[in-house]
């Protein structure tokens, strides 16, 4: 996996030749998806996305199924 750069963030592992609009859309989805999100099992726990729809609570260690990309729907 390639190094990420400050300007293109997570898209740095993809490479060149796609354009700014594609890069911006990719980073808007990929960035929040990879971050730890609020776990439904523990009030201070965080959940990490293992695969599409598979999550793991870092506090309790429970593995559970949920939405594919984000645990909470953006408003």
Image (cartoon, rainbow, N blue to C red):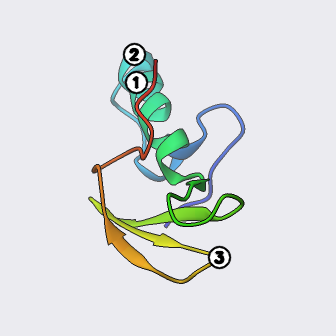
Q: Distance between the residues labelled 2 and 3?
A: 37 Å
Where is residue 15 shown, x and y percent of the image?
Answer: 42, 45
11 above or below 46?
above
Mark 2 or 3, which is nearer the eye? Answer: 3
**Residue topped by disc 3:** 59
Where is residue 20 shown, x and y percent of the image?
Answer: 45, 18
For image coordinates 30% across by 56% down, the residue present is 66
Q: How far apart are marks 2 and 1 (CA)?
A: 6 Å
For image coordinates 46% across by 17% down, the residue present is 75
Give the mark, 2 or 3, whose residue is nearer the N terminus: 2
Give the mark, 3 or 1, whose residue is nearer the N terminus: 1
Q: What element carries label 2?
A: helix
Circle 3 packing at 10 Å, graded few (<14), some (14-19), many (20+), is some
Mark 3 or 1, which is nearer the eye? Answer: 3
Where is residue 21 shown, x and y percent of the image?
Answer: 39, 16
For image coordinates 54% across by 59% down, the residue present is 39
**Residue topped by disc 2:** 21
- In the rendered structure, the answer to whether residue 56 lies left or right of residue 8 reads left
**Residue topped by disc 1:** 25
- In the rendered structure, the answer to whether residue 13 lies left or right of residue 46 reads left
Q: Residue 51 carries which label?
A: none
> In this orientation, which residue lies closer to the viewer: 12 or 31?
31
Where is residue 73 shown, x and y percent of the image?
Answer: 40, 31
Q: What element carries label 1?
A: helix
Circle 1 packing at 10 Å, graded few (<14), some (14-19), many (20+), is few
75 above or below 36?
above
Circle 2 packing at 10 Å, graded few (<14), some (14-19), many (20+), is few
Cβ atoms under marks 2 and 1 closer than 8 Å: yes
Mark 2 or 1, which is nearer the eye? Answer: 1
- In the rendered structure, the answer to whether residue 66 lies left or right of residue 44 reads left
Cβ atoms under marks 2 and 3 closer than 8 Å: no
């Amino acid at each position: 996996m390639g190094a990420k750069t400050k300007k293109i963030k997570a898209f740095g592992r993809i490479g060149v030749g796609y354009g700014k609009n594609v890069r911006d859309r990719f980073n808007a989805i990929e960035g929040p998806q990879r971050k730890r999100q609020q776990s439904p099992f523990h009030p201070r726990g965080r959940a990490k996305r293992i695969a599409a729809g598979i999550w793991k609570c870092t506090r309790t260690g429970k593995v559970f199924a949920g939405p594919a990309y984000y645990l909470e729907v953006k408003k």
